[in-house]
Image: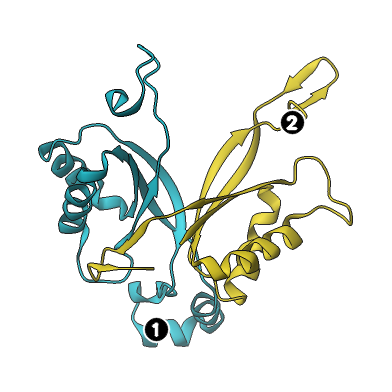
Chain colours: A cyan, B yellow
Amino acid sequence: MKEVMAIIRVKKISKTKKALLNAGFPSMTCRNILGRGKRKVDFMLTISPQEAANEIPELYEASSEEHRLVPKRLLTLIVQDDEVKKVVDGIMEINSTGNPGDGKIFILPISEAYRIRTGETGKYAL
Amino acid sequence: MLMVRAIIRIEKVEEVLKELSVAGFPSVSKMDVVGRGKQKGFKFGDILYDEIPKEMLLIIVNDEDKDAVINIIMRIAKTGENGAFGDGKIFVSPVDEAYTVSTNSKGL
């Protein structure tokens, strides 16, 4: 079993959910998280650069100096080994806009799984 | 690749994040968690608090960077010289694969 951990944009979550459901992966866990990546976010994209530099130079400096945290969604799915590629491709297809900040997907090994209701283990628990 | 999961005090998060970014590890995810440790929470008079708020940091690093990241968190998130109960824990688990969504590429 593998755990697929995907950190994606907030506004892409409903489309991703729908796509995963259609692909046959209804079960998942979703969390609100804050995160940052390799690149700094340019918060001044929302205002014109000239205006920003004239009126609030300190703010412009501060925002371009530091790595700030932005809100993201963390999706977690536990799937069988052979299904990983399908899930990854599904998430990629919906979330890929080609811009930095689209997110990351991590695959982690899971050693055991249990269904609490029946006590089933292994692949029967999924 | 390894995933470093650090559960630390809320008030230490900002400093840890700053230090990580200076040391060249800007990529971090952060989430709010509540939990208790070996001390079973803490007791205040008759009331037992066993859901103590903490922050969890998720950092995925290459194997060789693991020690650097852990050292930074250990150093900054510690309270006082000898540390105190509730400073947190760090867990490290293996990551098989990583993908970047924007470029459809494999790797960190």
In the image, residue B107 lies at what x, y percent? 35, 68
**Residue where numbered disc 2 is placed:** B38
Image height of B4 relative to A49, above or below = above
Q: Do labels 1 and 2 share a chain?
A: no
Q: What element carries label 1?
A: helix
Of residues B70 and B78, the one nearer the viewer is B70
Q: How far apart are marks 1 and 2 (CA)?
A: 54 Å
In the image, residue B98 lies at what x, y percent? 35, 61
**Residue where numbered disc 1 is placed:** A51
In the image, residue B74 lies at what x, y percent? 72, 58
Q: How crowded is mark 1: few (under 14 residues within 10 Å), some or many (20 or more)?
A: few
Q: Is mark 2 on a helix, strand or loop?
A: loop
Amino acid residing under circle 1: Glu
User: Which disc number belongs to residue A33?
Assistant: none
Of residues B49 and B61, the one nearer the viewer is B61
Q: Is residue A56 visible?
A: yes
Query: Outermost residue toward the left?
Result: A22
In the image, residue B43 lies at what x, y percent? 81, 23
Query: Outermost residue toward the right?
Result: B81
| Residue B70 placement: quadrant | bottom right
For the C terminus of chain A, give its image quadrant. top left
A56 on left or right of B13 = left
For the N terminus of chain A, give its image quadrant. top left
Of residues A57 and B10, the one nearer the viewer is B10
What residue is shown at x 21% (from left), y 41% (from top)? A17
Q: How crowded is mark 2: few (under 14 residues within 10 Å), some or many (20 or more)?
A: few
| Residue B69 placement: quadrant | bottom right
Mark 1, chain letter?
Answer: A
Image height of A12 relative to B76, above or below = above
